[in-house]
Image: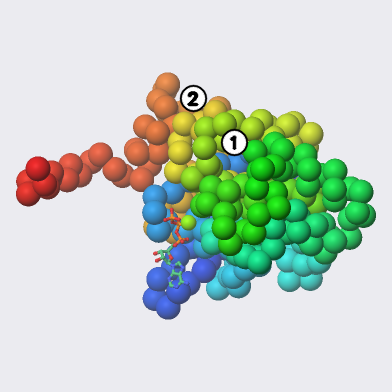
Amino acid sequence: MDLAVETHALTRRFGELAAVDGIDLAVPRGSLYGFLGPNGAGKSTTIKCLTSLLRPSGGTIRILGLDPATDSLAIKRQVGVIPEEQALFERLTAVETLSFVGQVHGLDRATIQTRAGELLDLLDLGPAANKLVADYSHGMRKKLALAVAVLPAPRLLFLDEPFEGIDAVASRQIKEMLHQFVARGGTVFLTSHILEIVERLADHIGVIHHGKLVAQGSMAALRSGAGGKTLEEIFLDLVGAGDTEKPALDWLA
Ligand SMILES: Nc1ncnc2c1ncn2[C@@H]1O[C@H](COP(=O)(O)OP(=O)(O)OP(=O)(O)O)[C@@H](O)[C@H]1O
Ligand SMILES: [Mg+2]
């Protein structure tokens, strides 16, 4: 299988803690891969390792068939990222931000203008296009982060919680955009706690729990192995919720 992301025994430690504990990821090219796990499971740490924001403690990574240790520039040219904590330039407007990103990627002025206009329109950021990022709401920042990731037309997108804080109108546009991107051969690796979105969008799933990959495969295989369960039910089974009923807070009225 042609893989966009492949890892063997990928590990990242923070002191004693193995936040990512020997995972073997296999993300097919042209797939939309939903990477699921409870809070603190290791999702963001994995994405940071895959995008060279963090150095792995062990294991190997291949991105689009390339080795990040030797081909980092070639990888950067083909990859877009929304990291967990998106750092944007507070003193720039959205238009200035996208123009800067486009120039860094060597796009010409006309291309930048066309793409930025289309992205701002798609994400309903048009009215705020000339406002300083410092004055943006949480959701507006999130949308701009997506525009930054997409503008250079990458082949592979890493999106850490792209739908968190995004309104229903923009969510729908983003879902359609990702669908189209994948239909044209792009690959998306995303994390989300909104399982209904992942269920509808993703064709491949990986589940991480306490740093270990506890399930991975096509959505169809996962579903057929689980006898008609929803993704939420499959997920809760995998991460062991439900088998320990926690007491209610009897002091909370
Ligand atoms: N810089 C750090 N230093 C120490 N521990 C860290 C650091 N970053 C993450 N961790 C720990 O690694 C584990 C995995 O964190 P990570 O952020 O990858 O989880 P996550 O799956 O993205 O969770 P969430 O759904 O809440 O975003 C957690 O136990 C976290 O406390
Ligand atoms: Mg996270």
Rendering coords of residue 103 (x, y %)? 85, 61
Give the label on residue 224, or none.
Answer: 2
Could you tell me which residue is drawn at 73 percent across and 42 percent down? Answer: 119
Rendering coords of residue 241 (x, y %)? 29, 43
Could you tell me which residue is drawn at 45 percent across and 65 percent down? Answer: 19
User: How is the protein colored in the picture?
Assistant: rainbow
Rendering coords of residue 80 (x, y %)? 71, 54
| Nearer mark to the viewer, of 1 and 2 | 1
Q: Quadrant of the N terminus?
A: top right
The relative height of residue 57 versus residue 171 in the rendered view (above or below) is below
Rendering coords of residue 109 (x, y %)? 91, 54
Left or right of residue 241, residue 58 in this image: right
Element class at badge 2: helix
Q: Nearer the viewer, residue 36 or 180?
A: 180
Give the crowd class for mark 1: few <14, some 14-19, many >=20 residues within 10 Å: some
Element class at badge 1: helix
> Which quarter of the picture shows residue 220?
top right
> Which quarter of the picture shows residue 100?
bottom right
Amino acid of disc 2: Ser
Give the crowd class for mark 2: few <14, some 14-19, many >=20 residues within 10 Å: few
The relative height of residue 97 versus residue 174 in the rendered view (above or below) is below
Amino acid of disc 1: Ala
Q: Which residue is mark 1?
A: 170
Left or right of residue 252, residue 61 in this image: right
Could you tell me which residue is drawn at 37 percent across and 32 percent down? Answer: 233
> Which quarter of the picture shows residue 34?
top right
Q: Quadrant of the C terminus?
A: top left
Could you tell me which residue is drawn at 59 percent across and 70 percent down? Answer: 54
In primary-sequence order, the first of circles 1 and 2 is 1
Q: Nearer the viewer, residue 13 or 251?
A: 251
Left or right of residue 251, residue 185 in this image: right
